[in-house]
Image (cartoon, grey):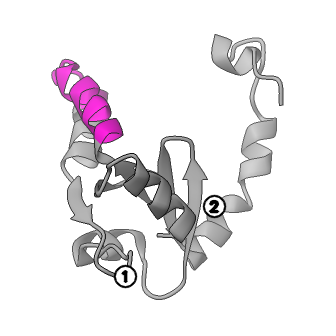
Amino acid sequence: MPKAHRDRLENAGITRLIVTRDRSNCLLIYPMPDWVEIETQLMSAPNSDPQIRAMQRLYVGHATEVEFDSNGRILLPSALRELVGIRKKTLLIGQGKKWELWSEEAYDAASEMWPEEAGDVDLASASEVIQNLSI
């Protein structure tokens, strides 16, 4: 974890993080307080809905608590690293209240499609949040 991010977390009294799998073939890293909110929302949704159950299995089922070691590193569980193909080189991308951790190969493949995917958004049928974005 880069020192600037780690320092901000530690200054806020946050030493525990949650690492979980994302459907985009990367790992998501959340500060514990933010994860608690997400987990509460996910688990309060009716799991009789197959899509909700799938999201609960993916995000909550893979959620693993980690802490910084004395060198400011976190030990990623090998099972999660294997699921998303993390071996050596990684990229950490800030995404608001979370980070995405990508293997270099998965990031290269996925990021090539992002401009096209963003351009494919039909603003007439997009959510109000997207319609009101001013980027």
Give the residue type at disc 1. Asn
Dot 1 falls on a residue whose secondary structure is loop
Q: CA distance from mark 2 to mark 1?
A: 31 Å
Q: Image point 48% across, 41% down: which residue?
A: 97
Was residue 37 drawn as part of the magenta stretch in this picture? yes
Secondary structure of the magenta portion, mostly? helix
Instruction: Check residue 110 in the rendering and tell me which mark sits there, or answer none.
Output: 2
* Residue at numbered disc 1: 71
Q: Image point 28% across, 76% down: which residue?
A: 69
Region of the chain picked out in magenta, as a range: 33-52
Quadrant containing the C terminus in the rendered view: top right
Q: Quadrant of residue 124?
A: top right
Give the residue type at disc 2. Ala
Closer to the camera, 101 or 34? 34
Residue 42 appears in the picture as rendered:
yes
Was residue 39 drawn as part of the magenta stretch in this picture? yes
